Image (cartoon, rainbow, N blue to C red):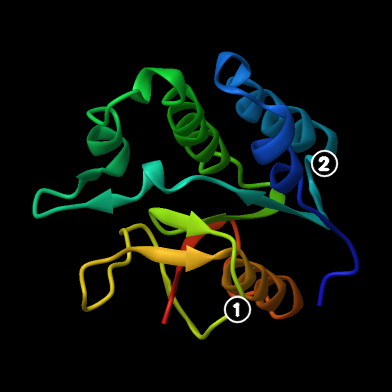
Amino acid sequence: MYSSVIAPSSHLATVTIRPPQAYQHLDLAARLVALLRGTLTPRLVFILGAGSLTTGENHHLLVEDLRRLPGAEAWIATPENQIKELRFLQCVDDVNWVAVSPSQTFVPGKATGFVLGRDELLVASDGSSHVTTGTMAVAMLNEIERPAHVRERFTVRDE
């Protein structure tokens, strides 16, 4: 188990960073990585968006679908910059990091059982891609307590 963890995105993604400043996702990741080069602790835990997950028969990024939604111009910079953040992290091999992407629909709610994946949008048998905040928290805590993903991203959906 890791003795210390830094999870910067959980607060910033929902409270501080708004679309006009969405580049700060990448800036923060770069700053933390620079400070921790060559270390194993603390472990960095990043919360990314679902936009970087692949979907569809052609395995395109979900962000391509999101761009077509009405009003997307008001918020699309956030998932676009979270993709840049993930691409940056995937180049980092000397810092202990993990990233997690929620399902397409990420809503407040109690924890349920969960399903983990890697880079593809997870879809339930009814066609939905859904995870609650409670389920996401449990999946993240499981990862912190029993690391299964080192220097990679995983995704989670409700069971």
Element assignment for label 2: helix
Q: From the viewer's perspective, is 138 left or right of 86?
A: right
Q: Residue furthest bottom?
A: 113
Q: Position of residue 97 (x, y in %)?
A: 67, 53
Q: Quadrant of the N terminus?
A: bottom right
Q: Position of residue 33 (x, y in %)?
A: 74, 37
Q: Is residue 82 above or below residue 152?
A: above
Which of these two is toward me, 86 or 111?
A: 111
Q: Earlier in the sequence, mark 2 or mark 1?
A: 2
Question: Residue at point 48% right, 30% down?
Answer: 84
Residue 132, by quadrant, is bottom right
Question: Residue at point 47% right, 66% down?
Answer: 131
Element assignment for label 1: loop
Question: Residue at point 22% right, 78% down?
Answer: 125
Which residue is tagged 2? 36
Q: Which mark is residue 111?
A: 1
Question: Residue at point 49% right, 45% down?
Answer: 49
